[in-house]
Image (tube, helix red, strand yellow):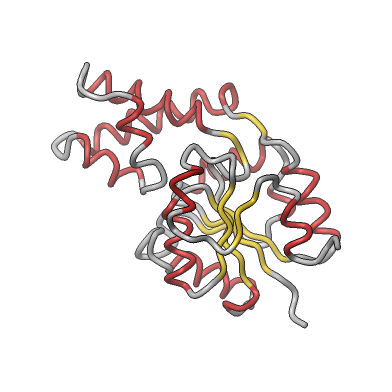
Amino acid sequence: MKKPILLFDLDGTLINTNELILASFMHTLELHCPGKYTEQDVLEIMGEPLYDQMRRFDPDQAEEMVKTYHAFNERKHDELVLEFPHVRETLSELDRAGVLMGVVSNKRRLVVEMGLKLFDLGRFMKTVVCIGDTEKAKPEPDMIFLAMEHLGGTPGQVIMVGDSRYDILAAKRAGVASAAVAWSLHAEELKKYDPDYYLEDMRDLLQIVGVRS
């Protein structure tokens, strides 16, 4: 039997960047579009590529808004990013059991690597696919296809684990299984997209892939 492959989104799935993302957006929006948007407006589009998000707010300023966001986000990253419970211990156990893992993120490689480094998660990942590595980002399947190619896997081996509808949709379009996480800011919404698994706790993965009975 082939080894299972787990592909993870990063933000909101492996690391808690919720406060950082919201702070970065509100800093940017107040600077470029003062008084026009709220955190709820941001929550509704979390998970999309950043430039697409900024175009929704103001297409004329989108490029400058992305630059503002990046500068604030990098400056505040290590201060505002937190760990989710049981992530490191679960990844460690999966790794010891020979489960292949990778990250598939709609973020830039720079900040993806910052997040992995902050909590020493990069050592578990055999591939890291970021925005720009493929022509299209999630919810299209291209990034998942590239990660599978890097790992020598087939769709039947793969579970895509994520916290947004873009992760679930990308998994479905790639023909792989999907797992939604209950600690997502969009937890109830995710159930509407019919993920194959719904993780109440990161440790649930250990039973799903057969590491624990």
**The one of 43 and 136 positioned closer to us in this rendering:** 43
Q: Residue at x 26, y 19 (%)?
A: 31
Residue at the far left in the pictured view: 60
Where 108 sits versus 62, above or below?
A: below
In the picture, residue 128 is in which quadrant?
bottom right
> Total number of numbered labels?
0
Q: On the rendered structure, is 111 left or right of 115?
A: left
Residue placed farthest to the bottom in the image? 1
Quadrant in which the N terminus appears: bottom right
Q: Residue at x 56, y 67 (%)?
A: 147
Q: Nearer the viewer, residue 50 or 195?
A: 195
Query: Residue 163: x percent and y percent?
Result: 52, 47
Residue 36 on image: x %, y %: 20, 22
Apparent side of residue 175 relative to residue 85 in the rendered image (left or right): left
24, 172: nearer the viewer: 172
Check the image and report above or below for 171 versus 10.
below
Residue in the picture at 50% in, 26% down: 19
Quadrant for the C terminus, please: bottom right
Q: x, y percentage for residue 166? A: 42, 55
Q: Is residue 72 left or right of residue 16?
A: left
